[in-house]
Image (cartoon, coloured by chain):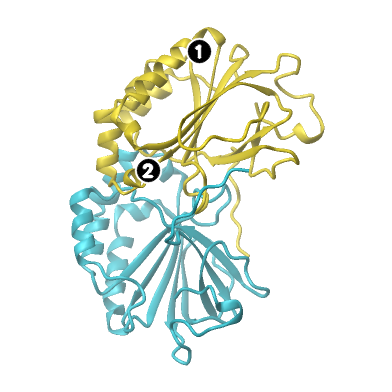
Chain colours: A yellow, B cyan
Amino acid sequence: MSHATASSLPRLFTFVGADHGPWAVRSVRTLMGDALPPAPCLQVVAGGAVPPPGAAWALAGITSNERYVERHEKVALVGAQAGLGRAEATRAALIPIRKSPAWWALTQDERRAVFETQSHHIAIGMRYLPAVARRLHHCRDLGPAEPFDFLTWFDFAPEHEPAFDDMLRALRNSPEWSFVDREVDIRLVRDQARPSQGGESGPDLAITV
Amino acid sequence: MSHATASSLPRLFTFVGADHGPWAVRSVRTLMGDALPPAPCLQVVAGGAVPPPGAAWALAGITSNERYVERHEKVALVGAQAGLGRAEATRAALIPIRKSPAWWALTQDERRAVFETQSHHIAIGMRYLPAVARRLHHCRDLGPAEPFDFLTWFDFAPEHEPAFDDMLRALRNSPEWSFVDREVDIRLVRDQARPSQGGESGPDLAITV
């Protein structure tokens, strides 16, 4: 069998809805399509984890190359954005999204036109940097039967949650969202009773945030 | 656990180098990077197959949305191309390719510029339609440690193999190929002693071509 060396930075992450974990679920709102089974806590695991017994759900996604961002936009984003895991970012959101077959049948120029020219997806997101940090994970090409196409993980300080809601309102009112056929918005708070980094043992060792 | 319904058309395929199978390996040429272990035959299996005992290698890839093609190009391609599996297409090629980290760090506009404006990838391919049929499979986002980024499967009649070689020569001389850091060119001939479709049993049941 042939194997390549893996990159040193993890690309694959699994989000697990479970009965314990460092993030407590504050709310789950199903905006479109089927709901997820309820779970009180969330774990973010680096790699393609086998869900622990009793997990309500597990969603995997992989970071990848950019699909729409152009160089001038990338320079602006990199200059403005913050990394995940800041001490003050005790709130988070996981937003799994699936887009319709009509979206995936569009050609690259058509998707870019909807995404930015019509919907200003990048420009809207820019307004909320660096308060909102994010990491986009792709699911659609992990396999032929993934329940979502994208998982986006956001974190922010509690005082920035209203701004985060403004951002989502603008995106959800854009033409791009007419192609969204499943969306769940999971809001989380970091468990203050537990350390946010290190010092853990057992099944949580691989948890990254 | 949450599961989606799969599309009715298969998207995931596994190419298996083995000691039997409907395609006999005529030649293997490693153009860049590591070679694959030798195998006398090839099987093309729909799905993420577990390789049979004794398989030399197994490479999986998934069909996906187009990354560079624009609408006017798509219309031209669809109008000219033939499907895989024509009775006269008794020759085939599997060409696994990996691109460099420098490629994946480019933004969308930069990759499109190299791919088509500078390298004429789509325009070159168009010249060989419908003689050469193809299916592109993506590997990079199947997981974090795939040995290749793309697997392209081609089939054609024996008399069109020189044209196929011309096409590859043009592509390999283009600026895009400076980003290719692993490439293997496997040429195959369909085993004439076996039926090309149906009527098989046992472990070959899922073989598609």
Dot label at residue B6: none
Q: Residue at x 48, y 89 (%)?
A: B194
- Amino acid bearing label 1: Glu
* Of the pair B84 and B181, the residue shown nearer to us: B84
The chain letter under disc 1 is: A
A58 lies above or below B135: above
Identify the residue at image location x=53%, y=41%. Answer: A62
Label disc, if present, on residue A100 of the rendered structure = 2
Looking at marks 1 and 2 on the same chain, the residue that comes earlier in the sequence is marked by: 2
Disc 1/disc 2 C-alpha distance (Å): 28 Å
Look at the numbered disc 2 and give the secondary structure of its residue: loop
x and y, in percent, of residue A64 in the image: 47, 41
Q: Nearer the viewer, residue B132 or B85?
A: B85
Q: Residue A204: where, in percent of width, then height?
A: 75, 32
Q: Is residue B168 above or below residue B38?
A: above
The quadrant of the image that shows the N terminus of chain A is bottom right
Instruction: Give the side of residue A194 with respect to residue A46, left or right.
Output: right
Picture coordinates of residue A34, whole percent (x, y): 50, 38
Q: Are marks 1 and 2 on the same chain?
A: yes
Task: Specify the quadrant of the image occupied by residue A203.
Answer: top right
Q: Quadrant of residue B126?
A: bottom left
**Residue tagged by mark 1?**
A161
Q: Is A186 positioned to the left or the right of B170 in the image?
A: right
Amino acid type, callout 2: Ser
Give the image location of residue A13, x and y in percent. 60, 38
Chain under numbered label 2: A
Q: Is residue A24 above or below residue A7?
A: above
